[in-house]
Image: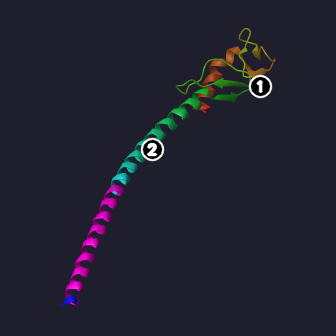
Amino acid sequence: MLAMIEKLINEHGSSTILKERLQLINDKYEVLESKLALAEKENESLKKELQRISSQLEAQEKSKEFVSFKGAKFKRKPSGSFENSVYCPKCEGAMVALENMFPFVCGSCGSTAGFNGGQLTKVLQEVASEYA
């Protein structure tokens, strides 16, 4: 009879211990699920922010970009179109054309472009169509 009572106590005691351990495991699981859900939300938010910042960076890089064409450089505006100014391919300084029949020349280093002041409108159209 004592053996039977001892067996009952052992089984019942083990059951309580197992139940407590199971509850502890369930509590930890719920905490981990909560942390996972929070991490997933944060991850989505960070992905959106990364996409936004990447788009801004791409636009910023595009706006600072110089394009070489016919012996000169042209600078992009933030809108993606090009400035009406002509820049030196060597030093990126401003180039000028005296009258409309002389080629553009850099005031700093003396480099010349392959077109003159009268051709600027046409060259700008070509640049815009080629680098759009």
Of residues 30 and 102, which is closer to you in this image? 30
> Under tag 1, what secondary structure?
loop
Specify whether 98 is left or right of 42: right
Residue 47 bears which disc, if any? 2
Of residues 70 and 60, which is closer to you in this image? 60
Specify whether 115 is left or right of 38: right
User: Where residue 94 appears, x then y in whole percent?
Assistant: 71, 16
Specify whether 5 is left or right of 79: left
In the picture, the quarter occupied by the N terminus is bottom left
User: Where residue 75 appears, x then y in whole percent?
Assistant: 63, 24
Q: Which amino acid does label 2 sit on?
A: Lys
Colouring chosen for the image of the structure: rainbow
Counting labels gives 2
Q: What stretch is highlighted in magenta?
A: 3-32
Name the residue at 41% across, 42% down: 45
Name the residue at 22% across, 80% down: 9
- For this orientation, the residue located farthest to the front is 2
Query: For residue 63, what is the image quadrant?
Result: top right
Residue 90 bears which disc, if any? 1
Residue 21 bears which disc, if any? none
User: Where residue 50 appears, x then y in whole percent?
Assistant: 48, 40
Reply yes or no: does residue 11 show up in magenta.
Answer: yes
> Under tag 2, what secondary structure?
helix
Name the residue at 36% across, 57% down: 32
Is the residue 100 above or below the residue 28 in the image? above
Is the residue 102 above or below the residue 4 in the image? above
